[in-house]
């Protein structure tokens, strides 16, 4: 008997008749959705960017530089120079029980010749595992150094992305050759560009990486510049560091508490700090987001309840003409649903628009690229809609329960 | 046999006993109706007359099931109105009673067409039939050319005619009108009177509040109210 079309007709008519309310309520939901989704998008982007930036340094590595003793030990005076060789690295690899990986790094600035160009580049000689430890991912079509390169002292090189660009321009560097310190080298891979906001020598993008064995043969260098290692369990990095210190200190006879004989940079401390920082940051976002929701919710609920109360006489007229209380509430429900859906959708579009325009500002390196989270937008809009619904429901029900004449006379 | 069939056998469509209505405004209590006994037979045309403030509109609202009496008993076609559920009341208001309000009570933001269409929407009438019916009614009250006007764009008399058209939309068997010619000149007032006479001839029960002696004379019964009580009740 009841014609579904007539319900829709009433709905459309009322929305049209109440332009201001339709506009205000929808605006409230749009505003709340945009505010919360933008906040979270930017927060997430910032978070991701920071993680990318520190990951550029490596996967929870500890960096160790042999240096000069600063404490006298067992009759030996301070100021002694500690110099480590490849067999010391072997020793640590064998003895340290919870060690995951270790690589030495030899560094020097060497002369490179390619065609007519001659330049000085920072060269590092490392183990094949170094690539993984330092998040040096090759661009498609290339590779990092492998164990065979190391074993056979191959003259192969892995290039930082900017160095590759300088040397070979837009042509594919893999397979190309150049001369380094007088010897011919072949490029096997190029670094996939990565974010890196800290380093312990030059940036990876400018570096030339060759096998450690090749480096030693090429330059005659016996001593390592530094070494890096990781623990099997990141939580136990400190323990492993102590173990490594004890092994080196035992062999070279220096005080294991000497902070300078073997200088240590535990980057996991930075990760731990970052974790704490991000936690605080997320809590901050959560609080600001919640407050935004509360403020938006108060706005939406005020508009709703005021408007529904204002419409009590209209509800009275409708009931006098035969509208059922259920119909009046159902219509109110539908209206709120429409405000919410439309408001949420517009909010999402605005957020997406802002996120799309954002990269053109060139702030990526600092705050990352915000992306819209549809779920967050939908959730925000729904929450605001729900608040509006609750705020409007009780006055709507109260109006629908009055005698029509009483409702009509309400002002 | 049920109450309904007894009432129908008696011909009573409206039966009120000891109806009182007290308005409680907080500070003072106004006893607008002080014990009304009224029986109206199916097909009667009752004119309700009386001075301003005597309780005519109050009585009409109660007859139309738009308000609840403070005291007393009211049966519509033998059915106790007090016992009706909200949805039953809605159906009565929608299908059985056509109400013309003293102050029209048209919704101001929508067109007169849409105002007249409203009871049909609540009655679940299909779009095609709604349009047909609204157009027919608007022609009937002489406003075929004012369908897209909003109430605020109409004169008092035109609004009154829209209110009449709206009351008739669902083809009710009881027409209740509160001063339906109050804002009309004698010519359009006459048209409404003709319309009401026609509705009555078709067998409807009419209760009309009026100050208009000509309209009151058209009715077959005159009920006079003074100070919340029926003082005279004459059939012609
Ligand atoms: N909602 C209300 N609250 C309080 N008092 C009311 C209310 N409605 C009506 N009254 C009072 O009840 C009495 C009867 O009012 P009612 O509207 O029924 O008079 P009426 O006979 O229709 O008058 P009129 O011819 O002027 O329309 C009046 O004294 C009026 O002031
Ligand atoms: Mg009155």
Image (cartoon, helix red, strand yellow):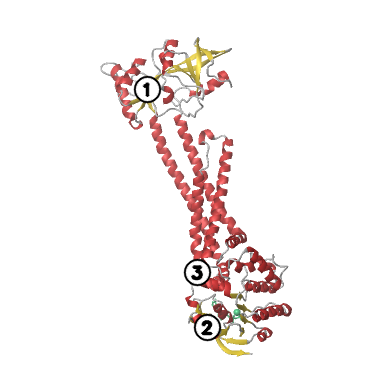
Counting other residues with Cα less than 10 Å from the Cα at mark 3, is it few (<14), some (14-19), or many (20 or more)?
Answer: some
Number of callouts: 3
Closer to us: A68 or A132 = A132
Furthest residue in direction left, as rendered:
A74
Q: Do tag 2 and tag 1 residues touch (Cβ < 8 Å)?
A: no
Q: Nearer the viewer, mark 1 or mark 3?
A: 3
Q: Is residue A209 above or below residue B57?
A: above
Disc number for residue A258: none
Q: Position of residue A121 (x, y in %)?
A: 50, 17
Picture quarter containing residue B104? bottom right
In the image, B236 versus A2, the foreground residue is: A2
Q: Given the image, what chain letter belongs to the residue carrying mark 1?
A: A
Residue A403 seen: no
Is the residue indicated by label 3 positioned so its CB lies within 8 Å of ligand 1?
no
Q: Residue beneath label 3, please?
A: A401
Helix, strand or loop under label 3:
loop
Tell me residue B99's x, y (percent). Answer: 60, 75
View quadrant of ligand 1:
bottom right
Q: Position of residue A229 (x, y in %)?
A: 37, 24
Report the residue marked by disc 2.
B7
- Residue where numbered disc 1 is placed: A102
Mark closer to the observer (2, 3):
2
């Amino acid at each position: 008997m009841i014609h579904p079309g007539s319900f829709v007709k009433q709905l459309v008519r009322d929305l049209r008749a109440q332009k201001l309310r339709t506009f205000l309520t929808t605006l409230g939901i749009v505003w709340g959705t945009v505010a919360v989704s933008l906040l979270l998008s930017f927060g997430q982007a910032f978070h991701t960017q920071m993680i990318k930036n520190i990951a550029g340094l490596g996967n929870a590595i500890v960096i160790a530089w042999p240096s000069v003793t600063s404490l006298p030990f067992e009759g030996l005076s301070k100021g002694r120079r500690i110099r480590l060789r490849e067999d010391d690295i072997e020793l640590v690899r064998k003895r340290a029980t919870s060690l995951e990986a270790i690589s030495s790094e030899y560094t020097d600035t060497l002369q490179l010749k390619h065609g007519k160009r001659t330049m000085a580049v920072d060269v590092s000689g490392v183990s094949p595992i170094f690539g993984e430890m330092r998040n040096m991912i090759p661009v498609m079509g290339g590779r990092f150094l492998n164990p065979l390169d190391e074993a056979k002292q191959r003259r192969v090189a892995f290039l930082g992305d900017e160095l590759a660009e300088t040397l070979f321009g837009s042509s594919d560097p893999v397979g190309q050759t150049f001369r380094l310190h007088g010897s011919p080298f072949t490029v096997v891979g190029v670094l996939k560009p990565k974010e890196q906001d800290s380093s312990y020598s030059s940036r990876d993008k400018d570096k030339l990486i060759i096998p450690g064995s090749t480096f030693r043969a090429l330059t005659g260098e016996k001593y390592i510049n530094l070494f890096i290692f990781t623990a099997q369990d990141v939580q136990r990095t400190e323990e492993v560091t102590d173990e490594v210190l004890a092994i080196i200190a035992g062999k070279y006879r220096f005080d294991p508490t000497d902070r300078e004989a073997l200088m240590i940079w535990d980057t996991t401390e930075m990760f731990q700090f970052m974790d704490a920082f991000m936690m605080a940051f997320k809590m901050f976002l959560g609080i600001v987001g919640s407050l935004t929701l509360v403020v938006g919710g108060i706005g939406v609920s005020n508009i709703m309840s005021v408007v529904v109360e204002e419409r009590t006489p209209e509800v009275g007229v409708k009931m006098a003409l035969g509208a059922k209380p259920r119909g009046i509430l159902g219509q109110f429900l539908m209206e709120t649903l429409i405000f919410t859906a439309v408001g949420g959708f517009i909010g999402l579009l605005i957020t997406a628009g802002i996120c799309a325009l954002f990269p053109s500002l060139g702030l990526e390196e600092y705050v990352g690229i915000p992306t819209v989270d549809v779920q967050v937008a939908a959730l925000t809009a729904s929450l605001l809609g729900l608040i509006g619904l609750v705020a409007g429901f009780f006055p709507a029900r109260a109006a629908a329960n009055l005698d029509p004449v009483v409702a009509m006379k309400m002002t | 046999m049920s109450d309904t069939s007894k009432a129908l056998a008696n011909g009573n469509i409206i039966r009120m006993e000891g109806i009182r209505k007290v308005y409680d405004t907080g500070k003072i209590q106004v006893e607008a109706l002080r014990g009304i006994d009224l029986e109206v037979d199916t097909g009667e045309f009752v004119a309700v007359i009386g001075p301003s403030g005597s309780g005519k509109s109050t009585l009409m609202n109660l007859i139309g099931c738009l308000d609840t009496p403070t005291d007393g008993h009211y049966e519509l076609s033998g059915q106790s109105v007090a016992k009706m559920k909200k949805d039953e009341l809605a159906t009565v208001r929608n299908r059985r009673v056509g109400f013309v309000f003293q102050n029209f009570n048209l919704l101001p933001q929508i067109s007169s067409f849409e105002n007249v269409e409203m009871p049909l929407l609540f009655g679940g009438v299909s779009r095609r039939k709604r349009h047909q019916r609204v157009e027919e009614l608007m022609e009937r009250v002489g406003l075929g050319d004012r369908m897209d006007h909003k109430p605020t764009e109409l004169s008092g008399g035109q609004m009154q005619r829209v209110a009449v058209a709206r009351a008739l939309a669902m083809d009710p068997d009881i027409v209740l009108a509160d001063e339906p010619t109050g804002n009309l000149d004698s010519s359009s007032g006459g048209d409404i009177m003709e319309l009401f006479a026609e509705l009555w001839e078709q067998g409807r029960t009419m209760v009309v509040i009026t100050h208009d002696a000509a309209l009151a004379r058209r009715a077959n019964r005159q009920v006079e109210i003074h100070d919340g009580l029926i003082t005279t009740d004459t059939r012609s």
